[in-house]
Image (spheres, helix red, strand yellow):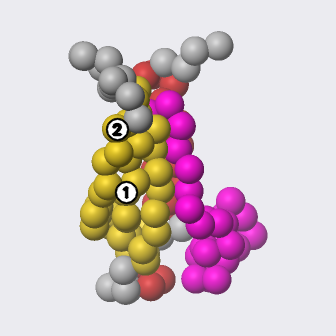
Amino acid sequence: MRKTKKDFLKKAEQASAFYRSVGQSSAKIISKNIIPICDQYTMVTVHWGVTFRKTGDKLIEFDVSYIVYQPEDDPSIILFIAHQDEQEAMKKLGLLNELNPA
């Protein structure tokens, strides 16, 4: 079954709600590396920096790679790979508890 942009946006909103629930207060792209795979596919590795209420101004950095399908008019992310174990990292920062076990 092909996922639609509407499906992606719904999942993105669910993810956003989760990150807000654990206190994420900001997110920004620190850097990105774009590697063409072929005419219509690209791998983009993004180095993110985020802050949480619990960690204050300390920037928490991590990488995610995205495989992007790029037809002429409607690019879409078809796969993403987190380079770190996000749940483990959040536990170490004390962001997860019984209410937000991830």
Q: Is residue 98 left or right of residue 72?
A: right
Q: Quadrant of the C terminus?
A: bottom right
The answer to which quarter of the image holds residue 26 is bottom left
Disc 1: which residue: 46
| Quadrant (top left/top right/bottom left/bottom right) for the N terminus | top right
Mark 1: which secondary structure?
strand
Magenta-span inclusion, residue 21: no
Residue 25, image x and y in percent?
36, 69
Tell me which segment is drawn in magenta.
Answer: 77-102
Q: Position of residue 23 (x, y in %)?
A: 47, 70
**Camera-side residue: 30 or 39?**
39
Pointer 2 residue: 36
Residue occupying image coordinates x 35% and y 45%? 35
**Residue at the extreme front:** 38
Q: Is residue 45 visible?
A: yes
Vertical side of 58 occupied by 24: above or below? above
Q: Quadrant of residue 38?
A: top left
Give the residue drawn at x 43%, y 77%: 60
Neighbour tally class for label 2: few under 14, some 14-19, many 20 plus, Cα within 10 Å = few
Is residue 89 one of those drawn in magenta? yes
Q: Can you give x and y, in whole percent of width and height, for residue 41 in the image?
A: 40, 29
Q: Is residue 90 above or below residue 57?
A: above
